[in-house]
Amino acid sequence: MITVITGATAGIGAAAAEGIARAGHDVVLVGRSRARLDSVAARIETLTGRRPDAHAADFASFDEVRALAATLLGTYERIDVLANNAGVMTPRRETTVDGHELMMQVNHLSGFLLTHLLRERVTESAGRVVTTSSRAAKSGKLDPTDLDRKSRRWFGWLQYGDTKQANALFTGELARRGVTATCFHPGVIKTGFAAGTTLMKIYGLIPGYFKTPEQGAANLVRLATTADGADHSGRYFDDDGRPAAVPAKMEDPALAAALWTASLAATGLPPETPETPA
C-alpha cells in the first residue's frame, strides 16, 4: 500500500506518516522543507526499517504542485491513499505567486489541483482521498465567486473557516464523482500552527485543551488504513473518531458543485461538464 501525505514535515502530518508507516504502508512524504522531510524520513526508517521517499513542493505555487504530480505519476504505479494534509493559518492577508490568497491556495486549491491530477491513479488503485478539514468549517461562509475574500471583510480566522468548509465540500463532491473520500477534524493541536494568534493563546490558557500531534493524527491514520476510510465516503469525522452530522453548508451539493467549478478555473484546469452523482 502506498500513501502520499502532504504537509508531512511536522505536526499531525509527521505523526500520521509515522502511524501509517507502522501500519505497513509505504509512505511518500511531501512538504516544503527538504531538511525537515529528511528528518521525518530518518525517524520513520528507525521505527520501521523502511525509509520513505520524500518530495519537496511548496503548495503556495501551482507550478510546484504540477511538478510534484508529474513526479508521483512517473514514480508510483499505484497510489492507495492520497492524504491532503498541507495547511496554513495566517492572520494577515498574503498573496501567492499565482495571485491567490495564501490560505485558500495552500489549504484547498493546491490540494484540489493535486487530487485532480492524481485522481485517475488513485481510482485505478481502488484508493481513497483523506483531507484534513477542521471544526472551523462550521464557521465558514464560503463564496465560490470570491474565494480570496477580495470583496468581503477580511479576518484571518473567517478565511481559514472558508478554506476548511471548502475541504468538506470538496470531499462530498469527490464522493459524488465516484472517488472514495473522507475528511476530518484533528482537534486543536499543540504545534507551531497559528501559534501567534490571540485565539490560540486563549486556548493555551485552558488546561488540557490542546491535543498532542499523535492524538490529532489518529483520525488520519484510521481513515487511511482501516475500513472507516472506505465505508463512510463523503463523510466528515469529528475528533472523537466518528462520522458526524454537519451543517448544510458543509455538504450542500449545489454549493459543492459551484466550488468545484470555481476551483477548476482558479487552478487553470479546463472546465468540465457536470457529472451525474454516482
Image (cartoon, rainbow, N blue to C red):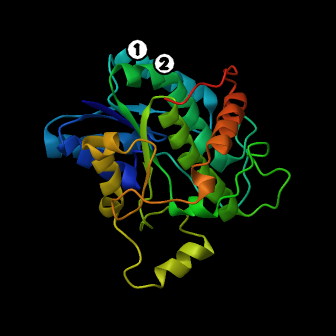
| Residue 196, horizontal then vertical, whole percent | 58, 69
| Residue 210, horizontal then vertical, whole percent | 40, 73
Residue picked out by circle 2: 70
On screen, 108 above or below 120?
A: below
| Residue 152, horizontal then vertical, whole percent | 83, 57
Residue 217 appears left or right of 236? left
Three-letter amino acid code of the residue under disc 2: Ala
Residue at the spot 61% in from the left edge and 42% down from the top edge? 253
Residue at the spot 65% in from the left edge and 25% down from the top edge? 274
Question: Which residue is at the front of the view, 162 or 10?
Answer: 162
Labels 2 and 1 touching (C-beta < 8 A): yes
Can residue 91 be seen?
Answer: no
| Residue 275, horizontal then vertical, whole percent | 59, 24
Q: CA distance from mark 2 to mark 1?
A: 6 Å
Three-letter amino acid code of the residue under disc 1: Gly
CA neighbours of label 2 inside 10 A, class few (<14), some (14 to 19), many (20+) = some
Can residue 219 be seen?
Answer: yes
Name the quarter where the N terminus is drawn. top left
The local secondary structure at tag 1 comes to helix
Question: Which residue is at the front of the view, 104 or 248?
Answer: 248
Identify the image quadrant of residue 136: bottom right
Residue picked out by circle 1: 74
Residue at the spot 45% in from the left edge and 84% down from the top edge? 206
Residue at the spot 30% in from the left edge and 47% down from the top edge? 228
The circle drawn on residue 161 is: none
The local secondary structure at tag 2 comes to helix
Residue 82 appears left or right of 202? left
